Image (cartoon, coloured by chain):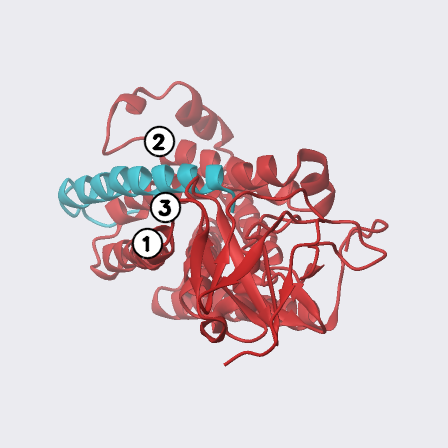
Amino acid sequence: MSVGFQAVQWNRKKRVYDAILIAAVALFIGAFMTIGALRNPPADMPAWINLRIKAFGTCAFVMLTIILMIGPLARLDRRFLALLYNRRHFGVLTFLVALVHAWSVADWFLVQGAVGDLIAEMTGSPNYGKFIGFPIKALGITGFTIMFLLAATSHDFWLAFLGPRVWKALHMALYLAYGVLVMHVALGVMQEDRRAFIPLLLGGSFLAVTLLHLAAAWRERDVAHAATANWIVVGAPESIPDQAARIVAAPNGERIAVFRDGTQIGALTNVCAHQNGPIGEGRIINGCVTCPWHGYEYRLEDGCAPPPFTEKLATYRVRLRDGVIEVDPRALPPGTKAAMRLPSVG
Amino acid sequence: MTRGHRRFHRLLWPALALVVALGFTMALVLRPPTEPPEQSEPGK
């Protein structure tokens, strides 16, 4: 996981994921271009390029919407974790689709010898002071630049170089890109094309992303309310699912994942050392706590990754009191042995 | 996600969602009336 350097760490699951992704993108763009050409046959090269612009632009927007839905979906239903596993490849492919869209816009001006118009629109337009009529290409370039930054820093090299905290904070800029791109479409194609399905699809996509985030945040409220003073009550041992965890919140807001592996109970920070993924939403596989995001593994007893890996998680003391598991919210240094074993469970 | 990320995330997306929802609604309401079709610039 952290030993040696590989450009991309491929495995069979990632190849299948990517193959399905590329096939779906090809199908979407092929269908869009075919149906568009049949319904309104392009008369010349600029019209063909315009169709390409719309096909790739729509595809990139749909992909971006799906990417933003994966996080809350995985939090609400574990079956969506499969989508989260390789989300970075999804993001990079979205950037490449957006790149074709952006290149096609430039191409539209190039084939007509009108690059000067594009430059004038971008640099000296008085429309920057307007709402309707605002230069939408400036919004597109802003969103595209953010996507470029995120795609360029998606590799684990940048994750290690910047550190998980900075990397994660940087990649939250995707929300900003999405907001800018919603307005790119709302002030662009939605103004030109009066058909009802455009605002319906655009508004529906935005609403879906928002509602899913609200639903996931609502579910987290239960965890936040569990925090009390000193030791935190987790529940009876059998209330912790075997080879999985219950997540509790420390008074300082930090999440603690309390795992049970048979009769062994251990508590780890809920933040994976790799990409700050939610460890407590993972499972114990082959004796190791396994992060649901990218499969990073840690021993339950001390939070250390098994050799030859070197990642360590902070651990927490646990105890059984009056038949109830409690956890001390004061974190121990990463790699400290703190798990306990019960005589029996249930 | 660390506590800091969670706090940032919770502040960022509702504020952004409100701004975008307002922008989208304004863009929808202020759409100009339909004009006769002609060769138009690329939409996006």
Residue A67 position, x and y percent, is: 48, 56
Q: Is residue A51 visible?
A: no
Looking at the rendered structure, the number of numbered marks drawn on it comes to 3
Q: Report in which chain the residue with disc 2 lies.
A: A
Identify the residue at image location x=58%, y=38%: A165
Q: Which residue is mark 2?
A: A135
Say what secondary structure mark 3 lies in.
loop
Q: Secondary structure at mark 1?
A: helix
Up the image or down, B6 lies above or below A134; here it is below
Q: Which residue is mark 1?
A: A221
**Amino acid on which disc 2 is placed:** Pro
> Looking at the image, do the residues carrying marks 3 and 2 touch, with CB atoms under 8 Å apart?
no
Q: Is residue A205 visible?
A: yes
- Quadrant for residue A43, please give it: bottom left
The lab-note entry on whether marks 1 and 3 share a chain reads: no
The image quadrant that residue A236 belongs to is bottom left
Residue A1: x and y, percent?
Answer: 77, 56
Q: Position of residue A122 (x, y in %)?
A: 43, 26
Crowding around mark 1 (Cα neighbors within 10 Å: few <14, some 14 to 19, many 20+) is: few
Tell me the residue that label 3 is attached to.
B43
Few, some or many residues within 10 Å of mark 3 (<14, 14–19, 20+): many
Q: Nearer the viewer, residue B41 or A286?
A: A286
Q: Which chain is red?
A: A
Image check: B35 left or right of B4?
Answer: left
Left or right of A240 in this view: A284:
right
Q: Amino acid at mark 3?
A: Gly
